Amino acid sequence: MPSDGLEQTLVKVDVLDAVTATDAEVAAWHECAVAAYRELWPDEPHPPLAYHTQRVRNPGTTKPYRVFVAWDDDRERALGAAETWWWDGANAHRIMADVYVHPDARRHGVGRALVDAVAEAGRADNRTGMLGGARHDTAGLDFVTAMGAKFGLDEFRSRLVLPEATVTPFEVPGFSVVRWSDGCPEEWLDSFCRLSEVMNTAPQGGEVRWNDDTWDPERMRRSEADLRAKQLTEYTVCIADDTAHELVALTQVQIADTWPEVGEQHDTGVLSAYRGKKLAKLVKTEMALWLQQEFPELHLLSTWNAVTNDSMLAVNASMGYGDRERWAEAEIAFG
């Protein structure tokens, strides 16, 4: 066997189990993940070992997290990984996946072996495909094309460097800011469930389609409990119509307890009847101000938006989000 362990015809892939994975195995995967991360984003904070450890040890039960790792023959070096999230709700037919290969282990079948391993596990759980993304200026786009992926709507990844951002507060008469970080207050729970379904109106395109999802208080509480179990804190800012006493706009940011330097902005939306009132900018401004004021260790906030979502992209640009990267939404069917 050559010393680099890469000329093998069969790449060994398995799941890092929350209970049985050793610290050495987690550390080997961490080294691989950081190498891939540095190649994509060399000027951003890189995840610490504690971050990857908590992901393995606390996979959760709602949208459970599982990481598939490809190993060398001695099981000492991780050649690549597929981080997966097993969706629930109306889109439980698919798995969200982030597949990467160590930069010096490419073109030896590692990526294909990872996709095959996820596909085998997915078929056993009645899943039909894995959905992820590939940046346009990387070999990842060629890889998913070669794997027969179908493509959805391209997205821009934009980022806000919080210590350098100048965020100016403003008000919209008739509307108030509501925010929380440890679960939606009971007063607003029903309204927030209704508002969360605004994401069904997010832009879609290409061959990838999303089913309309529904939320009720029980599901919302399960999701909140699951985030706590995963050691993730979700910060939520909403805008309320003072007259109707109804939440009409939202944005959410997740920050891992073990990696407080980086936040990921998730859902942002405004009910259709309230668009054109600057509520998208208001809700994102209030989030940025909150994070700036109370979390000085938070350095970077990243967000994803469809390339066709001109209004949200304009809001981002006005707030100082920059360095747009174009990513292709790609789904590989399990067949």
Image (tube, rainbow, N blue to C red):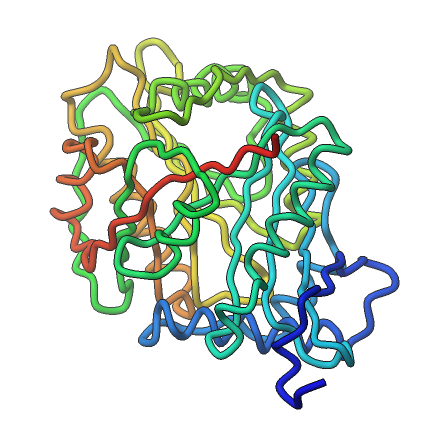
The foreground one among 25 and 182 is 25
Please tell me which residue lies in front, 114 or 264: 114
Q: Nearer the viewer, residue 255 or 16?
A: 16
The N terminus, quarter of image: bottom right
Question: Measuring 36% from the left and 53% from the top, which residue is drawn there?
Answer: 142
User: Which residue does the image show at 35% across and 69% down from the upper left?
Assistant: 41
Q: Quadrant of the C terminus?
A: top right
Percent x, y for residue 137?
26, 59
Q: Which image quarter: residue 53?
A: bottom right
Horizontal and vertical percent for residue 133? 41, 46
Q: Residue furthest right?
A: 20
Give the x, y percent position of residue 227. 64, 44
Residue at x 82% of width, y 73% of height? 22
Q: Compared to 124, does 192 lie above or below? A: above
Count up the numbered dots: 0
Q: Residue at x 15, y 33 (%)?
A: 310
Q: Quadrant of residue 82?
A: bottom right
Residue 261's place in the image compared with 236, above or below, is below
Q: Is residue 284 left or right of residue 75?
A: left
Decide: is 196 above or below 314. Answer: above
Coordinates of residue 296 in the picture (x, y in percent): 39, 68
